[in-house]
Amino acid sequence: MSAPRASRRLDGLVPWLLPLGLLAVWEAASQGGIISNRVLPAPSAVVIAGWRLASTGELWVNMGVSGLRALIGLAIGGTFGFVLGLTNGLSTKFERATDTLLQMVRNVPHLALIPLVILWFGIDEAAKIFLVVLGVFFPIYINTLHGIRTVDPHLIEMGRTYGMTSFELFWRVILPGALPSIFVGLRYALGFMWLTLIVAETIAASSGIGYMAMQAREFLLVDVVVLSILIYALLGKLADSTARLLERLCLSWHPAFQSK
Amino acid sequence: MTAGALSLGRVAPEYWREARETVPVSSAGLSLTVRDLKKSFGSNEVLKGLDLFIPAGQFVSIVGKSGCGKSTLLRLLVGLDKPTGGEFWYGAAPEEQHDKSAVRVMFQEPRLLPWARVLSNVEVGLGRARREKGARERALATLSEVGLGDRKGEWPSVLSGGQRQRVALARALVSQPRVLAFDEPLGALDALTRISMQNLLEQVWRDQGFTALMVTHDVAEAVMLADRVLLIENGAITLDLRVDIPRPRRRGSAEIAALEGRILDALFKDARAGEDA
């Protein structure tokens, strides 16, 4: 084995040293009785709780329910945001007609609508999905609009002089030009997606990760509460990584993604 | 004296006749006739009734101080703006119809699509013909002509400024235009890259025989490349100078310097010594 390869392996370990060290200290403190199990269970206890819930199937059902809510909300809200961002970006008339209303709605924190949403939909699926839709709509709408507005006018003029049709101009110049900004919107939207879902599920739900955490609190199962939080972190990371991967695939032309 | 007809003010009809006789008419190039062309932006009259005839295949440089209307003229001639008055046409008569790809323009910025590979960027220049058989081969041949055939699969972002401008040139050339307009095409390049690009421009112009219209702020470049230099001041042509120096021309030769001096004198005739123009 050559020296550079070994050092590269060590390099890969560096980002994990701190989290792993913290875990070790936490475990030791819990086992030694310094941290009460009522405050924070030991990492091993959380793992055991996870194993228990996974083997009964409860964990998978709740994760599936939460994941499905997130995806449906993202699909609906993202589509609306994207389409409206496109139309408003391409047509000033349309923007003039809709922008005032959109800005007014945008300035209402969407979580403030929870009481109203519960009155409308009860604690049904529709309530959670509605809130997620609202949460992801604006980041995608605003960034799509911004992306389209900031496409280099020189490129559009170039496309026109080379006889591109409106469709070609959109497909070959405007959309690819707006894509980096749209991806920024998507990643913001993913953050809002989980945030909204967590709040909605802890306040009004009968299934899902948030509901699981709230049930556990009722029965003082701190390990399950911590487990739920960790699962949210994991799902969030997974969503962000997927978005990054997509970004890397779609924006391979961008100098920021051309690492050697 | 190597410089030919020098006329101030509007171009006289005699000059047109002379130009027609002395410049060999290229089958590839199109002549350009401009009649009383005007352009105003609000109350600001940028072009004040321009008359001009450019024979087919001629290389014309247009020089002038910034804001004199030279770029406006070029934008009108390639159809990027609409004139407020007057008319112009390519070929023998205004009624003659030409394909849109007959007139191409190259800008100071390469304006390449960053998300398209070099070869795809050249293919943009084919317009509708992009889907025809052999389009890719044509694009590749043109790319090789500007010396970048081996870079066809690269992203534009990895190319140097001069290489990007070469790709832009290939894109403009690929449809075999009959008129090629340049708006300060080398303005953003460093001195050495400029020289090699000037050589390339001259070479493709001689190979393909299109009519070339080049707006530039570099008087030496204008004299080096052109058959004829037009000086535009306050929206009118104030100097129309033939450059009869045989090609290949030698950079920095006395003849070129003399002509350059004459144009600069005309440009700064109002400025007193020591005063900044």
Image (spheres, rainbow, N blue to C red):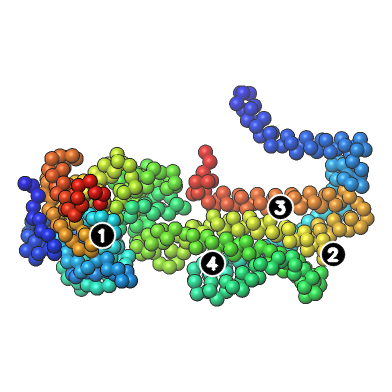
User: Residue reaching furthest top?
Assistant: A2
Specify the amino acid type for callout 2. Answer: Ser
The numbered mark, 2 or 3, whose residue comes first in the sequence reads 2
Specify the amino acid type for callout 1. Answer: Cys
The numbered mark, 3 or 4, whose residue comes first in the sequence reads 4
Alpha carbon of mark 3 to alpha carbon of mark 4: how far? 27 Å
| Residue B235 in which image quadrant | bottom left
Q: Name the residue beneath numbered marker 3.
A: A236
Q: Mark 1 belongs to which subunit?
A: B
Q: Say whether mark 2 and mark 4 are on the same chain.
A: yes
Alpha carbon of mark 2 to alpha carbon of mark 3: how far? 22 Å
Q: Residue at x 26, y 49 (%)?
A: B276
Helix, strand or loop for disc 2: loop
Q: Is residue A128 left or right of residue A249?
A: right
Q: Residue at x 71, y 66 (%)?
A: A110
Q: Select label 4 or label 2 by which is in front.
A: 4
Percent from the top left, x then y, of residue B233?
21, 59
Q: Name the residue beneath numbered marker 4.
A: A86
Percent from the top left, x then y, of residue A192?
69, 59
Specify the amino acid type for callout 4. Answer: Leu
Percent from the top left, x then y, of residue B178?
23, 59
Helix, strand or loop for disc 3: helix
Helix, strand or loop for disc 1: loop
As drawn, B99 above or below A59: below
Helix, strand or loop for disc 4: helix
Q: Name the residue beneath numbered marker 2.
A: A206
Q: Residue at x 12, y 53 (%)?
A: B242
